Image (cartoon, grey):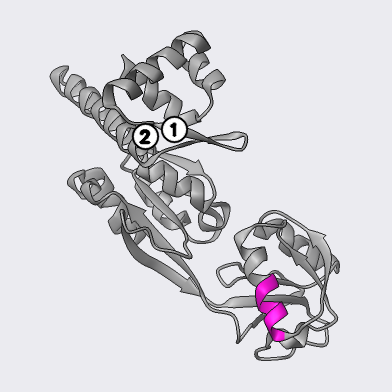
Amino acid sequence: MDLTAFAVFAAHLNFTRAAEELHISQPALHVKIRKLSESLGRPLYRREGRRLVLTADGEAVARFARGQDERLASFLAEFAGAPAQRPVVLAAGQGAYLYLLGDAIRTALASTPLRLINCDHRQMLAAVRGGQAHVGVSVLDVLPPDLSVRELASFPQMLFVPSGHRLARRRSIRLRDLDGESLVVPPQHRPQRVMLEQALRTAGAAWTVAVEAEGWPLITHFVALGAGLAVVNGCVPVPRGLAGIPVKDLPPVTYHVVHQPSAISDPRVVSLLSLLG
């Protein structure tokens, strides 16, 4: 069925992997998606550089297809007299999983099948919009108008420094205090890196890159090794041997929970949302 094929394609956004999962050839999958697009009169995906992305119509079709698949699975399970085992799907990033969502996930797993997707905020929004995930958690600079959004938790941004550093005994700092320092930072073009570079430029602080690292655990590890200082989200625990100092002229980091407005009709999703607080 073309809808089922499109749901699999939307999950991968890759014709090779989707065709392998469906056990059909790539040309056959191209034909199915082209026919579905022609029957609807709308393009369902587009190419951005080397990536394929769903259009807004494609996200709507993928969401409908996955919802139809869930409803069919629930009906067949109920018809057979067995409880439905379709999992609730949560999409979030590494930081949220490590420092924010552990208790809620542990509690949810005790009573509900739960599948976890590890992704960045753009992938999370695409997963929720396309129906690949029921609930998403991330830091969002712009709140999506098409999804239900609520604040989950807010944290100050902190400077991590070795305990013997000149700034370690300060109760708070400003970005100009980092003039001349070497910093451990995320790779270029990551949202936190872009924000930090702009803020340091505005503050007139000259700095150098000590190390580029992906993820708070590795960034923190490099600070503990003495490679440089780092600005991190306040949800990250301060390791032994380091000091965590609030950065006064950076805005707090706010995590949000997002879901489709219709998701609250599913008791499993409502239960997960209640556990998230």
Comparing 218 with 250, the one in front is 250
Where is mark 1, residue-wise? 45
> Are dots 2 and 1 in contact, CB under 8 Å?
yes
Can residue 37 be found in the magenta stretch? no
Q: Residues within 10 Å of mark 2 (few under 14, many from 20)?
A: many
Q: Which residues are magenta?
A: 197-203
Residue 36 spot, x, y in % from top left: 33, 20
Name the one closer to the observer, 71 or 46.
46
How far across and down, in percent of the image, does residue 211 sit? 82, 61
Residue 41: image location, x then y, percent: 29, 27
Q: Is residue 218 left or right of residue 127?
A: right
The structure residue drawn at horizontal position 42% and vertical position 42%, both measured from the top left corner, is 127
Residue appearing at x 74%, y 87% in the figure: 176
Identify the residue position indicated by label 2 in the image. 58
- SS class, disc 1: strand
Residue, x 31% and y 36% (percent of image)? 63
